[in-house]
Amino acid sequence: MSGHKLERTTEDIKRELTAIFRELKDPRVKDAFISIIRVDVTNDLSYCTVYVSAIEGIERCKKACKGLDSASGFIRRELGQRLRLRHVPELIFTASDSIEYSANISRILKELE
């Protein structure tokens, strides 16, 4: 797949995943304040790695990722219906602590002032 089309597809997947996450009823996902940090899609659209972060910390994010893993079939089906992709990639959810890390850096910078 060409670079431009792959980037556009990646952005579409990220946008739709954000909307789908709001509709999930799993308490591990619904009760967490999670954000999609980055989405990486392979060239042949067979795998999609979704990096997720939570304000509550990495442990809460890992719980949310377990909930997302259990709902991955529903998420894939919704993604396929919304984007009309010929092949919907297999979703791999990875916990990231980037929101917690950036909040810590911001706190340190405020202390320096």
Image (cartoon, grey):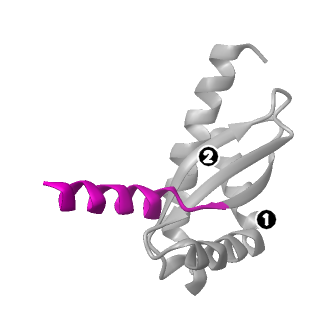
Figure check: 10 above or below 48: above
Amino acid under label 1?
Gly
Amino acid under label 2?
Arg
Query: Tag count in the figure?
Result: 2
Which residue is found at the position 25% from the left and 54% from the top? Answer: 109
Q: Magenta span covers which residues? A: 95-113
Q: Which residue is mark 1?
A: 73
Residue 103 occupies quadrant:
bottom left
Residue 88 appears in view = no
Residue 46 is a magenta residue: no
**In the rendered structure, which disc, 1 or 2, sits on the residue that comes first in sequence?**
1
For the N terminus, the quadrant is top right
Residue 55 appears in view = yes
* Image disc number at residue 61: none
Residue 70 image point, x, y percent: 76, 75
Figure check: 30 above or below 42: below
